[in-house]
């Protein structure tokens, strides 16, 4: 069957200005374009109202010091590394030019794109042209010149930041490409988009284009969005695979309606999503989304019923969310309850305190008082200028359902816990002073913001425009000053209690460790088989938008083609063998992956913590006895595709070592029983606790009868495990 693709957008934080400005779009009209610009089909429309074409030449220089080293010590501690992989990491760390030499760069004139293929997992990083100008050369000839936000140099640096900072497991092998400025993926106020059917990430770089940001500043500005979108890829691989035979795993119900006042449970359209229930329940508990009693701030009311003091903060903003008396568990229920009456009651409390903005939209703020917002000194013009309001606390009322939906909370809360920001000093402006004399823009960047200064008739001749990254924005909905606050047990220091760094009693395991372990166990870290995935093809139907322009092909012949990933205790296994009752064997080859690096943190990032002080947390720290003990390392793999329709149900699965190298799976080379310590960590089953079924089927399965196939284990009398293939019809 065919189904429209599912989208996971990341809404960009709004651009804030100290003085109101009406920015005019300088995209050429079609007539002007025909005379002055040669544009790719649809680019004018795609970039309209997104990018001011100011013909300001950006700086595309890249320095060796801009690159980050891969943490070989952590990688080697957890992985069985081949000599080739270790040599590759050393080469990349010793000379960043090897990211170019060992990778591959391709230009496509027809598609107006430059593609960089990295040397580690061969992911394609694609930058799409946003402008092509006809320019006269020194010799009098005319040449079409393409303009890119990053170019191949920026793509290389983006790939470097990804591998240096992004936690990832074997699911990385299914990420097809990362797009920058893909014209048909542009959506207003969307900074990033993950397409699970295609396993593609799209990033919008227009905020950083033609404002004279350095290449490093652009990549830093994009990196937090890339981090967020990749976590959607992770979640789609392991969490959004609820067993459809167990209807209790339904969550994230979205109520759709035109008029709340007249809406009832009977006339509201309801859509549901499914998740792995154990992850869903523990995630809520660790972040106090299920019950926040005792963790939410106390408040003092005025005589008029409004809140005068919320926790330790004076309240002067009437549309401050605390005025709605919503708890941490309330805000979760707003986006995820399956009960319409509950939803409506919470929504109406928020609606009562919301204010209407200039565009006629209801807004709330997470900032109790503007006086709380941080200040830094910047040095533009003849004298220092004080810049306030570095955290954009405002949010549209109807966007709360999106921000707190379970799909969105997974990447947002994971990033709050594990993200390593490039900048830490809140007072660092990182001004790019290498601009050409008389340049219109002067960009700046620090822990909180990426922004720029431009001339203005107000504000002593300058105005400051900036945006927060997702890490700061999401912490700003928990603490008024984002990550500058200390994580204390005192509930009055915060707005909401969704913080895994809140201290617990000395005799209890810290919540952040349990949170990190939850992600590891959900992804089946260390298990023989961790993920099962279908082959999925997609077709271009109409190049107008992503949502309407692509359809994914989920016909049985396509989704029957499967691959799986997992972790082994060595690299001497040749593959897996499915052996049926009649002794028919199906051999599936193993391909070993370079490494995985799903690290966490054991100290929270904040504006004043130096980068070197952040201590990583590794899988062996929470899944075994820790670094002071011998830890068995893992070798990760992905299999070739196999056709599940050709394998009978209840086939036993064997590991295969081709000891005589004849490429034939012989009975004496098959391993049928696995011990409970085979996964190299605590004694448990060699398969994860979650249903090990197709991680794509939430995209194509329907309420009609479909096949539910998965891997299962059976325990033997001598306390070992055997692996089996189960293929049942869902009734």
Image (tube, rainbow, N blue to C red):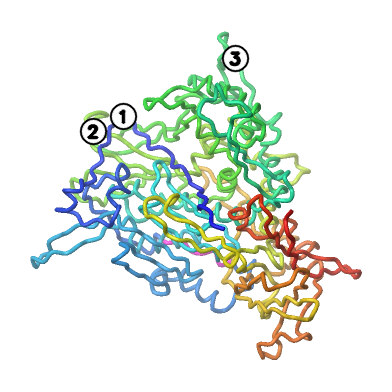
Measured in 3D between alpha carbons, the distance from the residue under mark 1 to the one under mark 2, in whole angstroms, is 9 Å
User: What's the mark number on residue 301?
Assistant: 3
Q: Which residue is mark 2?
A: 456
Measured as percent of width and height from the top left, residue 545 is found at 40, 50
User: What's the mark number on residue 19?
Assistant: 1
33 and 519: which one is in front? 33
User: Is residue 68 inside the magenta stretch?
Assistant: yes
Decide which of tag 1 and tag 3 comes sooner along the chain.
Answer: 1
Q: In the rendered image of this protein, does residue 592 appear above or below residue 60?
A: below
Q: In the rendered image of this protein, does residue 570 appear above or below residue 222?
A: below
78 and 275: which one is in front? 275
Look at the numbered discs 1 and 2 and tell me whether their residues touch, using CB distance below 8 Å: yes
581 and 626: which one is in front? 581
Q: Is residue 218 left or right of residue 373?
A: left
User: Is residue 669 inside the magenta stretch?
Assistant: no
SS at badge 1:
loop
Image quarter (top left, top right, bottom left or bottom right) of the N terminus: bottom right
Q: What crowding class fits label 1: few (fewer than 14 Cα within 10 Å), some (14-19), or many (20 or more)?
A: some
Decide which of tag 1 and tag 2 comes sooner along the chain.
Answer: 1
Residue drawn at 58 percent across, 40 percent down? 405
Decide which of tag 2 and tag 3 comes sooner along the chain.
Answer: 3
Residues in magenta? 67-73
Q: What crowding class fits label 3: few (fewer than 14 Cα within 10 Å), some (14-19), or many (20 or more)?
A: few
SS at badge 3:
strand
């Amino acid at each position: 069957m065919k189904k429209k693709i599912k989208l996971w957008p990341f809404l960009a934080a709004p651009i804030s200005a100290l003085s109101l400005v009406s920015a005019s779009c300088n995209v050429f009209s079609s007539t002007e374009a025909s005379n002055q610009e040669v544009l790719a089909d649809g680019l004018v429309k795609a970039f309209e109202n997104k990018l001011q074409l100011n013909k300001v030449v950006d700086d595309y220089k890249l320095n060796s010091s801009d690159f980050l080293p891969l943490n070989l010590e952590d990688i080697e501690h957890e992985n069985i590394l081949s000599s080739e992989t270790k040599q590759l990491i050393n080469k990349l760390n010793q000379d960043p030019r090897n990211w170019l030499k060992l990778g591959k760069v391709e230009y496509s004139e027809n598609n107006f794109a430059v593609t960089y293929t990295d040397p580690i997992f061969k992911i394609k990083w694609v930058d799409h042209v946003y402008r092509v100008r006809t320019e006269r050369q020194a010799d009098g000839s005319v040449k079409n010149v393409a303009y890119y936000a990053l170019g191949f140099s920026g793509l290389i640096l983006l790939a470097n930041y990804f591998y240096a900072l992004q936690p990832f497991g074997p699911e990385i092998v299914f990420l097809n490409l990362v797009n920058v400025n893909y014209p048909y993926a542009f959506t207003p106020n969307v900074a990033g988009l993950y397409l699970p059917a295609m396993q593609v990430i799209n990033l919008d770089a227009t905020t950083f284009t033609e404002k004279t940001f350095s290449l490093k500043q652009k990549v830093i500005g994009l990196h937090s969005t890339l981090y967020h979108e990749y976590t959607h890829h992770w979640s789609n691989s392991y969490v959004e695979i609820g067993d459809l035979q167990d209807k209790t795993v339904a969550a994230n119900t979205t109520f759709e309606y035109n008029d709340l006042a007249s809406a009832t449970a009977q006339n509201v359209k309801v859509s549901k999503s499914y998740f792995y229930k154990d992850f869903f329940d523990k995630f809520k508990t660790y972040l106090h989304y299920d019950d926040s009693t005792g963790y939410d701030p106390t408040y003092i009311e005025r005589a008029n019923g409004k809140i005068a003091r919320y926790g330790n903060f004076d309240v002067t903003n009437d549309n401050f969310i605390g005025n709605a008396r919503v708890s941490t568990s309330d805000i979760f229920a707003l986006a995820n309850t399956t009960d319409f009456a509950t939803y409506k009651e919470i929504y109406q409390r928020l609606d009562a305190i919301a204010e209407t903005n200039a565009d006629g939209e209801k807004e709330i703020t997470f900032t109790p008082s503007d006086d709380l917002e941080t200040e830094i000194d910047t040095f533009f013009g003849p004298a220092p200028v004080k810049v306030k309001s570095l955290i954009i606390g405002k949010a549209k009322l109807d966007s709360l359902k999106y921000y707190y939906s379970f799909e969105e909370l997974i990447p947002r809360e994971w990033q709050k816990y594990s993200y390593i920001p490039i900048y830490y000093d809140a007072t660092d402006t990182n001004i790019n002073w290498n601009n050409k004399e008389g340049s219109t823009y002067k960009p700046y960047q620090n822990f909180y913001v990426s922004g720029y200064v431009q001339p203005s008739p107000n504000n002593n001749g300058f105005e400051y425009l900036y945006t927060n990254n997702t890490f700061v924005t999401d912490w700003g909905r928990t603490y008024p000053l984002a990550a500058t606050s200390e994580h204390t047990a005192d509930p009055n220091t915060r707005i909401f209690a969704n913080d895994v760094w809140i201290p617990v009693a000395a005799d209890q395991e810290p919540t952040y460790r349990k949170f990190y372990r939850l992600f590891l166990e959900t992804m089946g870290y260390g298990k023989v088989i961790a993920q099962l995935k279908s082959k999925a093809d997609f077709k271009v139907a109409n190049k107008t938008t992503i949502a309407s322009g692509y359809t994914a092909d989920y016909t049985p012949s396509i989704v029957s083609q499967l691959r799986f990933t997992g972790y082994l205790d060595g690299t001497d296994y040749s593959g897996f063998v499915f052996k049926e009752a009649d002794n028919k064997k199906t051999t599936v080859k193993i391909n070993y992956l370079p490494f995985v690096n799903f690290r966490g943190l054991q100290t929270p990032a904040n504006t004043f913590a130096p980068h070197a002080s952040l201590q990583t947390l590794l899988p062996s720290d929470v899944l075994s006895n820790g670094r002071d003990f011998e830890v068995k390392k893992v070798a990760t793999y992905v299999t070739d595709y196999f056709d599940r329709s050709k394998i009978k149900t209840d086939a036993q699965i064997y590991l295969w070592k081709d000891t005589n190298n004849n490429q034939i799976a012989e009975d004496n080379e098959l391993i049928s029983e696995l011990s409970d310590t085979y996964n190299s960590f605590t004694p448990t089953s060699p398969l994860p606790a979650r249903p090990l079924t197709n991680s794509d089927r939430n995209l194509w399965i329907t309420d009609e009868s479909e096949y539910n196939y998965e891997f299962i284990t059976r325990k033997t009398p001598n306390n070992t495990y055997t692996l089996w293939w189960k293929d049942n019809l869902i009734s």
